[in-house]
Amino acid sequence: MAAGGERLQKYMARAGVASRRRCEQMILERRVRVNGRVVDELGTRIGPGDKVTVDGAALEPGSREYHLLNKPAGVISAASDPRGRRTVTELVPSAQRLFPVGRLDRDTTGLLLLTNDGGLAHRLMHPRFEVDKVYRVEVEGILSEGSLERLRSGIRLEDGVTAPAQVGRVSVHGGATTIELTIHEGRKRQVRRMMESLGHPVISLHRSGYAMLTDRGMAPGDSRVLSEREVRLLKQLAGKGAR
Ligand code: URA
């Protein structure tokens, strides 16, 4: 262990284990070993040649991966599922332990980032840096101009008023309405709850945009690796380097 090396929790986050804060908890839970010895102090520093394991698995910082998936319906947004249901990580080929950045409901389709970069994932999900998400939302009934206005100004839900949304491109078809809704918050089942509170339950929900990324050219179930430029842009959006 090196006196001037990198703090253990930072090293772990860089290796994609989890956010720095979660890594601190894992250290305190005595799940982390350095050179074979359990470490439960947050001040520990790691230098070249030190071997770190978490729950017995060796860490290899540096091999960070960033994938974009067009999630099909019926798949769980989790790294694993105790009930054995199909998860998004099964759809993305990688030797790394990836996890999704945020969640889409099981029946929601569309864009989901998967990475082993715990630091970036944490920032992208942080309310301070929430990036724009574009949803194509099909709802029951015909949405009135008043309902669209309420979406634009904010809707009172049980966990508070939603931030103003952008609403665009409306089509009406056979007693249903499709809108494009852009929000930057990421509350649980937010779009479904917003539409329910307007009296228009969601028929289908698809995330077609995430920050500067779109689903153009991606069929359901397709995934691709982000380019270096895309990763750089996401890091800028997530304020990396700002703290
Ligand atoms: N809002 C929802 O209600 N569900 C999702 O999956 C995503 C956003």
Image (tube, rainbow, N blue to C red):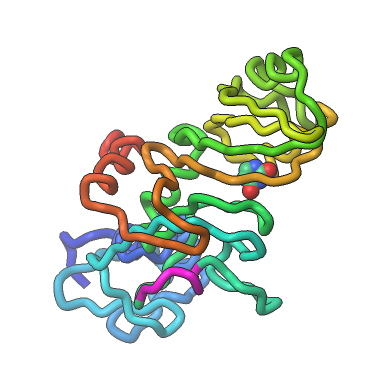
Vertical arrangement, residue 225 with respect to residue 90, above or below: above
Question: Is residue 28 shown above or below 120?
Answer: below
Q: Place residue 243 in its image quadrant.
A: top left
Residue placed at 82% from the left, 31% from the top?
A: 141
Q: Magenta span has 109? A: no
**Camera-side residue: 136 or 211?**
136
Residue 240 vs residue 101: left or right? left
**Start-end of magenta stretch:** 89-94
Q: Is residue 243 left or right of residue 170?
A: left
Q: Nearer the viewer, residue 180 or 39?
A: 180
Could you tell me which residue is drawn at 35 percent across and 60 percent down?
224
Residue 185 showing in the rendered view: yes
Residue occupying the point 57% across, 23% down: 168
120 relative to 207 in the view: left or right: left
Residue 95 percent coordinates (x, y): 35, 77
Q: Residue 47: x, y in percent?
A: 18, 68
Q: Give the side of residue 195 with respect to residue 32, left or right.
A: right
